[in-house]
Amino acid sequence: MDLPQEERYEEFHQVENGVGMTRYFINTFKEQNQQLPHRITHKRRLTIVTGKLAGNIIDEIIVKRLNRIKNLEVNSIIIKNNFFGESVTVTGLLTGEDIYTQLKQIEYGDYVILPANCLNFEGKFLDNWTPEMLETKLNSKVEIVDSDFISLIESIS
């Protein structure tokens, strides 16, 4: 099904439990769209981690737009949730080990981009992995992004 229009969500009161979260994310990204640079100085390759539920949205909106930035190559990877089972498709329930196991099988580039919602308030995945552990095991930079892609692009430039 297509994502409902913004008007259907009223004031996004239930963003934290998923209702409206995707629409809010899309709206925030679209607001940043005009501020994204046309190019970055150094060539960079990024892989955005996502769950199955958000996969199409990440590809169609985020990856497609970021790939218009010269010297930037962006891909996404849908991580299968082996920890909780394949029926769990949300990004917020991904674990560090599942991400590592599936990323190590592909060319993920210079940076791995993790959505902030896959980490708890202590900055850990549900299996107690940390982004630093993932970074060490992958031997690649790991960046956490909430919805601020302008800061992300600035930090990798």
Image: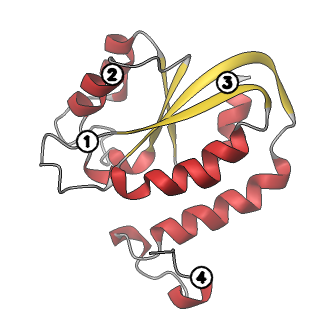
Real-space Cα distance between discs 2 and 4? 36 Å
Q: Would you call the spot at circle 3 few (<14 residues within 10 Å), some (14-19), or many (20 or more)?
A: some
Circle 4: element type: loop
User: Which tag is nearer the camera, tag 2 or tag 4?
Assistant: 4
Real-space Cα distance between discs 1 and 3? 27 Å
Real-space Cα distance between discs 4 and 3? 32 Å
Looking at the image, is mark 1 or mark 4 earlier in the sequence? 4
Q: Quadrant of the C terminus?
A: top right
**Going 53% across and 81% down the picture, which residue do you hit?**
4
From the top left corner, tell me how far across and down residue 123 is, in percent. Answer: 34, 39
Q: Amino acid at mark 2?
A: Leu
| Marks 1 and 3 in Cβ contact (< 8 Å) | no
Real-space Cα distance between discs 1 and 4? 28 Å
**Residue at the disc numbered 3:** 156
Mark seen at residue 134: 2
**Does residue 143 appear in this view?**
yes
Please indicate whether residue 150 sits to the left or right of residue 61 in the image. right
**Residue at the disc numbered 4:** 5
Q: Would you call the spot at circle 4 few (<14 residues within 10 Å), some (14-19), or many (20 or more)?
A: few
**Relative height, residue 100 to residue 17 (above, below):** above
Most extreme residue toward the left is 84
